[in-house]
């Protein structure tokens, strides 16, 4: 896929209806030969729209007028390209805990959580957030939590009666972030799309929780460093290895090796990735029913639901929605 096509596709399939700012900027970039030439000089994994826009916002670029943005990129390319090479799209959305909770709560308690691609580890606190799954006033979770996650549901979602008990939480990332570091927190804020102020508020509320009880995060590779980290989990707790929007950033052969690896480790495996990221899982469901901008949630290699990428919805699967390749 050419860089121009990548940005047009991003505008239509991801930004439209969610961020008018990014939709307009992505369309403009796709037609700006100056900016495209600069982007094409970067490694392929550093040309992505989210990374360009986040790095530009982090550096104070004008985002409202596409023509001004393009000119700013050209003038500040030296600084911008260094930031894009150094940084990663490590969006740490705590609201994804709302889509993970129905699975976590029904596993044998207590839990030892290990997140692959943990960023700053904000998804390691499902027991510290409050949740509302219906329009009524029913709220689940600690009454004094500053984080309230609202998630719509469709289908027979097994809603929990209580948050899970977590006795150990750890994460692995190529570049773990620290919410106690103001610069890391500023980068996480830059990754949130301009119009999404509630997500920024949620980020800062979740960061207060993580600062009070920091997670155990290590810098490492998901293949070589995962097994020794998993071995540190308490033996008397149920180990849960999970990831959200991570495998899309690694090559297909690494994804395959990771799946083989994680299936051989003790405990359970929860995957929450874009519908097309793990083709073997997607082949067992009606992918068309999921939509292009949704995730496929699975437990131990069995798809259970389509989910919103920012934890905003759960669409539980039924046998009728499984494809001919498999059934639940």
Image (tube, rainbow, N blue to C red):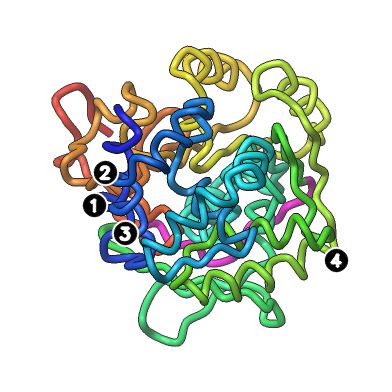
> Residue at 19% across / 22% down in the picture?
325
Q: Are marks 2 and 4 in contact (CB under 8 Å)?
A: no
Task: Report the Cα–Cα distance between label 3 and label 4.
Answer: 37 Å
Which residue carries the number 3 mark? 23
Task: Report the Cα–Cα distance between label 1 and label 4.
Answer: 40 Å
Residue 311 position in % (x across, y down): 45, 59
Residue 33 position in % (x across, y down): 34, 40
Which residue carries the number 4 mark? 212
**Looking at the image, which is closer to me, 325 or 249?**
249
Task: Report the Cα–Cα distance between label 1 and label 3.
Answer: 7 Å
* Label 3 CA crowd tier, 10 Å (few <14, some 14–19, many 20+): many
* Closer to the eye: label 3 or 4: 3
* Closer to the eye: label 2 or 4: 2
Residue 164 is one of the magenta-drawn residues: yes
Which residue carries the number 2 mark? 9
Residue 21 position in % (x across, y down): 37, 66
Q: Are marks 1 and 3 in contact (CB under 8 Å)?
A: yes
């Amino acid at each position: 896929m050419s860089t121009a096509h990548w940005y047009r596709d991003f505008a239509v399939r991801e930004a439209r209806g969610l961020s008018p700012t990014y939709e307009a900027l992505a369309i403009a970039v796709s037609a700006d030969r100056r900016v495209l030439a600069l982007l094409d000089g970067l490694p392929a994994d550093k040309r992505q729209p989210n990374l360009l826009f986040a790095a530009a916002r982090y550096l104070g670029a004008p985002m409202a007028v596409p023509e001004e943005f393009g000119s700013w990129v050209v003038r500040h390319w030296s600084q911008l390209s260094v930031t894009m090479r150094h940084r990663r799209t490590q969006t740490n959305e705590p609201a994804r805990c709302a889509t993970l909770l129905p699975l976590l709560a029904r596993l044998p308690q207590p839990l030892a959580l290990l997140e692959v691609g943990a960023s700053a580890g904000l998804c390691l606190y499902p027991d510290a957030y409050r949740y509302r799954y219906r329009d009524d006033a029913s709220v689940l979770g600690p009454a004094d939590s500053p984080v309230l996650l609202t998630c719509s549901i469709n289908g027979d979602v097994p809603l929990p009666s209580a948050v899970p008990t977590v006795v150990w939480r750890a994460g692995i990332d190529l570049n773990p972030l620290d919410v106690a570091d103001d610069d890391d927190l500023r980068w996480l804020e830059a990754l949130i799309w301009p119009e999404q102020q509630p997500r920024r508020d949620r980020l800062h509320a979740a960061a207060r929780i993580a600062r009070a009880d920091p997670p155990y995060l290590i810098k490492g590779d998901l293949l070589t460093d995962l097994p020794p980290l998993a071995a540190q989990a308490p033996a008397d707790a149920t180990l849960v290895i999970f990831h959200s929007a991570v495998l899309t950033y690694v090559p297909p052969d690494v994804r395959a090796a990771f799946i083989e690896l994680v299936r051989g480790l003790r405990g359970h495996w929860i995957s929450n990735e874009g519908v097309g990221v793990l083709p073997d899982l997607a082949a067992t469901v009606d992918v068309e029913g999921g939509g292009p901008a949704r995730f496929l949630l699975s437990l131990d290699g069995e798809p259970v639901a389509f989910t919103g990428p920012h934890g905003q919805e759960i669409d539980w699967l039924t046998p009728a929605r499984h494809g001919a390749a498999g059934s639940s």
